[in-house]
Image (spheres, helix red, strand yellow):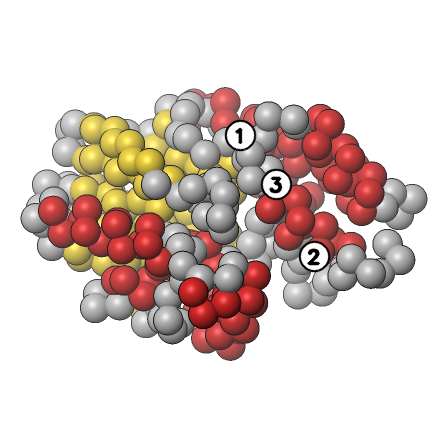
Amino acid sequence: MSVSTQRFVDPFLVIHRFESPHIDGGEGVNSYIIETSNCLIILDLPLLDSVAKNIREYADQLQKPIKKVFITHAHPDHWFGLYRFKDFESFSTPKTIDEIKNLGSQYLDFKRSSLGGDDADLPPEVIVPNNSVETFDETIDGVRFSWKLISNVEFLEGLYLIFDQHKIFMAGDLVYNGVHHYVGQRDESGSLCVTNWIDFLSSLEASSFNYVYAGHGPNAGFELIGFSVDYLKCVRDIITDPKKSRVDYRDFVNTRFPDHKVSEMIDISDFFVYGPPDSNS
């Protein structure tokens, strides 16, 4: 796990970013502690239990109360670690809560089987967020938190966060940086969500944000949004073309983005776009 921090003033705000390993199931996912003058807000918690434990220890050392825990969406690398924070109030969107409640045990069993069985670095049980939220604003210690619900993008339904006072976009998995994107999400009709995802990112104005915090990879400026749009547009041309196969997809992303990390994302996307490997796709 690597840790980085960025401090802001007027009002006081510190964003602590925790990046999981890129190998051994960590998926390079980011988790965040948002520190105000008097409390902590947790945003997403990682897949690996050891990383979640380290984040909890780090939070305890800050010696400020944890006010809330938010889970952006239902992909396992963003909520498995909630087990280490189960003693706090946790929040997510209605469909995210339903998905974790109904499918969380299956996700945990699958990850356990693929990461070493009973010895896997995973939580022992599923913890479901216990408060449902949609789009809303709140002010904590003078900091305006603008939570936005969005659907049919990288995930089925979830949250992103804006700090307009500091022009910060906490994008979660709406934006990746230097990591292969998961592109296999489908909406409730079964259609791939990649076009809706592209449309949303393309609608954002550069003047709105000076800082962008990604779901995977380091934070940077507004240029991160363009990087994700470019990646998604390239990949969309492959995965929506009925003449192209999973081999075409894998060859393309490995050739076009040779320096991107977390090849596991290619495997996961492959499965959800084309089906099991023994299919004829």
Q: Quadrant of residue 126?
A: bottom left
In this orientation, does residue 165 appear? no
Q: Quadrant of residue 280?
A: bottom right
Q: Residue at x 7, y 48 (%)?
A: 63
Of badges 3 and 1, the one in the foreground is: 3
Q: Which residue in the protein does label 1 denote?
A: 178
Instruction: First in sequence, mark 3 or 2: give its number.
Output: 3
Residue 149 as seen in the image, left or right of residue 7? right
Which quarter of the image is occupied by the N terminus?
top left
Q: Is residue 149 left or right of residue 198?
A: left
Q: Give the amino acid at mark 1.
A: Gly
User: In this rendering, is residue 30 above or below 93?
Assistant: above
Secondary element at image label 2:
helix
Q: Residue at x 40, y 30 (%)?
A: 219
User: Of 202 and 235, which appears nearest the observer?
Assistant: 235
Amino acid type at mark 3 = Ser
Give the camera-side residue of 180 and 142: 180
Q: How far across and down, in percent of the image, does residue 122 sit?
A: 41, 62
Tell me where residue 176 appears, x and y as whole percent: 51, 36
Q: Are marks 3 and 2 in contact (CB under 8 Å)?
A: no
* Callout 2 amino acid: Phe
Question: Where does label 2 land, which residue?
Answer: 272
Residue at point 35% right, 58% down? 49
**Between discs 3 and 1, the one toward the N terminus:** 1
Q: Horizontal and vertical percent for residue 247?
A: 82, 43
Left or right: 125 in relation to 140: right
The residue indicated by pointer 3 is 263
